[in-house]
Image (tube, helix red, strand yellow):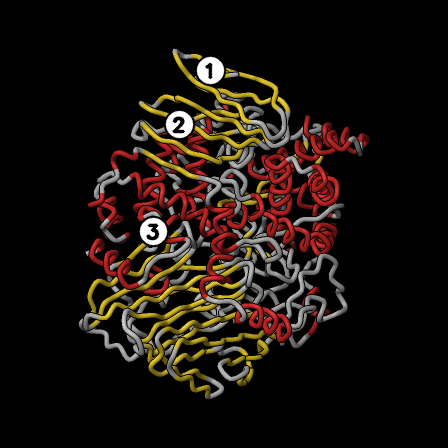
Amino acid sequence: MKKLLLLITSLYFPLSGYAAEHSQASMRIWFDTPNPSVANPVWNGASSLSTCGDGPANLDPNWENYSLPIGNGNIGANIMGSIQTERITFNEKSLWRGGPNTCKNSTHYWDVNKQSASILKEIREAFIQKDIDKATQLTQDHFNGKAAYNADGETPFRFGSFTSAGEFQIKTDIPENNIQHYNRSLSLDSALATVEFTHQDIHYQRNYFISYPDNVMVIRFSASEKRKQNLTFTYSPNPLSSGSFKKDGKNGISYIARLNDNQMQYAVRIKVLTQGGKVENTKDKLIITAADEVTFLITADTDYFMNFSPDYKNPKTYVGVNPIQTTQQWMEQAARQSYSQLFQKHYADYSSLFKRNTLSINPQYTSQEVLDLSIPKRLERYRTGAPDYDLETLYYQFGRYLLIASSRPGNLPANLQGIWHNNIDGPWRVDYHNNINIQMNYWPACPTNLAECEKPLIDFIRTLVKPGEVTARSYYNARGWTASISSNIFGFTSPLRDKDMTWNFSPVAGPWLATHVWNYYDYTRDLDFLKQTGYELIKSSAQFAVDYLWKKPDGTYTAAPSTSPEHGPIDEGATFSHAVIREILLEAIEASKILETDETERKQWEEVLSHLAPYRIGRYGQLMEWSTDIDDPNDDHRHVNHLFGLHPGHTLSPITTPQLARAARVVLEHRGDGATGWSMGWKLNQWARLQDGNRAYTLFGNLLKNGTNDNLWDSHPPFQIDGNFGGTAGITEMLLQSHMGFIQLLPALPAVWHEGSFTGVRARGNFSIDMKWKDNNLTQAVVHSGSGGVCHLYYKGEKLSFNTESGKSYIITYTKGKLTLNL
C-alpha cells in the first residue's frame, strides 16, 4: 500500500528540492490510519497535582499518541491528520500564566522566599545530636516556600503554567468513509509533516512545516484535480484569555488577546493564499470555495521579554515586546514569498543542523518489508523481540529533531513537553523542572552536534541568577545564586509551598544547571563565551555551593540539610548533593585557570573540594545514597540521583575509579531495568558510562518498548519529552565518550550492533568524529579538529595521542589490535 501511495504522489505532485534529492523513507514517522475528526477542543483546567510522582491521565490520548509535532523553537503545532475536520493544536512558547503582573502585582509575586538561613545552625546542631526527626521537622517547616504549585492552591496563582495558544480546525467537504491509501508522516530530514489520502480517485495532500527563518507556520492543501479545496478555517483561542477577532486585510484574520490572570498580550495571525477559487472572510473564519490549492500562513507572538535583571517593583518587568507589530512584520514578509520559497528557506536552515550527524546500524538488516510498516506496527513488532535497527536509529534522530524543533537561539528552552501542549494547564505545569528534567533535555545537544540548540538553556539560566541570589541569601545566607525544584519564565527560583521535602527540596538545582554552562564551553571551546558569559555563571554557582556547605567539627564539608530528589529522607549529606557540588567546583577551578583569574578564590574551592565528604560504599557493596547506610536493595525507585557522578558528572568511572564504579553497578542492579520513560533514559546513560554495552542496550530496548508512545514521544506517563532526549544522549554515550580527559571510541558497543557508522558526533575539546565499525571492531575513525590541540584517543586498552591543527582532519585505523594515525 505504501509503495502505491508513493507512486500516486510522484505522479500528481512532482517533488522538487527536498523530496527528489533528500527524502529518506527510513527517516519518517508515519501512520496509516487517520485520527477521528473533532470539531471543537475539550479544554482541561488546572490539575491539582502538586507532587512529582505519576502524572494525570491525558484526556486527549489521540493527541498524545498519534499526533505529529512540528516547531521552530518559538511556535509549535501538532498535526492530527483527520479527514473531515483537520485539527491542529498550537503553541507559542512564552505564553505563560502567572508571574508578577497578576492581580496582587509584583510585591506579592516576589514574596515567595522564607527567611530561613538562621535555622541552619539549629538543623545542623540537631544532626550533631543525632536528632534526625528534629532536623527533618525544621527543614519541612522552614525550607519550603510561599507559592503554591497549582491554580487551586492560591489566588492569584503566582507560579503559573505554560498554556495553549489555541487550536485550529480546517473543515473540508470530504467524508470520513471511503478513504484509501492514507498516510500521515513526519520527515525528520526535512521537518515536513504530510497527510495524504485518496477519495473517489482523487489524491489529496496536505503539507505542514514551521520556519525558523520566517517564524511562520505554513500549511498547504492540494489535490490531483482542480477546484477540490472547499475549506473552512476557524481558530479556537485559549479560553482563559479575552480578545477579539479582526479582519487582517482581505484574506487574513488576527486575534489580539490577553490572558485573564496576568494580562499577557498575545497575537495570532492567519492568512490564506489560494490558487483559483473564492475566499470569504467573516472576521473570525476563512471560507474557501473551489480552490485548486490553498496555503495558510500562521504566526504568533506574546509581549514577553526575557529579562536578566528584573525590577521587583515593576509588575511589567517581563513585558517588552509588541506582538501586534512583530506578527504583522512576520506575516507581511512571509506573504511576499511563494510556498516553494518559504519551504526552501526552512529546509536550508533546518537541514544545516540536522544533516551534521548521521547514524547507521546493521544496514543490511533493513528490509523494505519492515519499512512498509507504520510506526505503531513496527513498535508492536519490536515489542515481540524482533530486531529493527532502523527503528532504533530513527528514534535516535527523532530526539535530535525534537531538540531542533523546540530549542533555537533567541527563544526559551525546551520545557517538560518541549514546546507542545494541548491544554490550558498540564502535568507539572509543563514547567522547567530543575531536578533532572530540563537538564536531560540538553544532554544530546553538544554530543550530537547541536550546540546552538543549548543556547536557550544558557539564556534561561541567566534569567534565574538575580532572583536566585535572593533565594540563596534567604535560605542559606550564601553568596551566588541557586534555584529549586521548578522554574517558570518569570524568574521563579524559590522552593514551593508543599512541606513534602522528598520532592520540594533541591538546594543544588542551580549548580546542576550551571554545569551545562561549562559543558557548552568544553565542547565548543568558545573562549569569548567563557569570558563574557559563562564564567560568572559558573563562579557564582560555585560560591553558593561553598557557602551552603556545612563545615563539620571534624573539618569535613557536607551538604546539610540535603536530600536525594524525589526519594527519601532529609540527610546531613546526600551523595547527590556532594556529587553536584564536586562537579561545579572542579569546573570553576578549571575555568579560573583557563582565564587566569580569581587565584585566591580558586584556592578556597580547592580546599573545600579536598575536604568534601567522599563517596561511600555500603553494606551491600552499593554506592551509598545517604550519609548513613540505609539503602534498600529492593527499592526500584525511578530516581538514581546518587549516581550523578557517573552520569552526567565525571567523577565516577570504571577507568578512573573502578571500585566506585562497581558500587554504582550494584545500585543499578538493585534498581532494575524498568521504570518510567525518562528514568530508563537516565539508566541507559549510566550503563553506557559503566561501559556495559549489552546492559545499556537492554535499557534502550525497554525504553523503546515500554516508555514510548506510537508517535515515538516519551511516556512518563503522561507524555514528557526528557526521555526522548535521554535516549538519544544514551545512544551517543554507547558509541563515544569524552568526559574523562580523552576520547573513547565505541566504549559500550552492544554485541548486536556488530556493524555500523556515524558521522558528526562531537567530543569535548571541540573535536568532531566520524567512525565505522564491523564485526564489533573499529575499522576507521576520522577526527576533525575545531580548535587544535592534542587529541587523546582510547580504544580497547589502546591509547593514541597526537597534535592537531584547527580545521584539519586526521584518519585513524585499527588493525591487529593497534590504533594507527595515517599521515
Give the residue type at disc 2: Lys
Q: Which residue is mark 1?
A: 819
Please tell me whether mark 1 sits on a helix, a strand or a loop: strand
Q: Measured from the top left, where is residue 267 in percent x and y?
A: 57, 75
Q: Nearer the viewer, residue 179 or 230?
A: 230
Give the residue type at disc 3. Arg
Question: For the residues marked 1 and 3, what is the alpha-carbon distance in whole angstroms?
Answer: 37 Å
- Which of the two labelled residues, at mark 1 and mark 2, occupies the earlier sequence position? 2
Occupied quadrant, residue 320: bottom right
Q: Nearer the viewer, residue 632 or 445?
A: 445
Q: CA distance from mark 1 to mark 2?
A: 14 Å
What distance separates the C-alpha of mark 2 from that of mark 3?
24 Å
- Give, as a three-letter code, the residue at label 1: Leu
Q: Could you say where residue 818 lies in the image, as x and y percent from the top left?
A: 44, 12
| Mark 2 surroundings within 10 Å by alpha-carbon count, few (fewer than 14), some (14 through 19), many (20 or more) | some
* Residue 334 visible (yes or no): yes
Q: Which residue is mark 2?
A: 772
Which of 554/623 is in front?
A: 623
For mark 3, give the secondary structure.
strand
Using residue 277 as the reference point, say whether residue 115 is left or right of it: right
For label 1, the crowd category at 10 Å Cα-Cα, with few meaning under 14, some 14 to 19 and many 20 or more, is many
Q: Which residue is mark 3?
A: 28
Quarter of the rendering containing residue 264: bottom right
**Rendering quarter of residue 312:** bottom right
The residue located at (28%, 58%) in the rendering is: 10
SS for callout 2? strand
- 391 with respect to 418 (left or right): left
Judged left or right of residue 716, residue 217 is right
Asked whether the beta carbons under mark 1 and mark 2 sit within 8 Å of each other, the answer is no
Q: Is residue 339 above or below residue 698?
A: below
Q: Nearer the viewer, residue 273 or 132?
A: 273
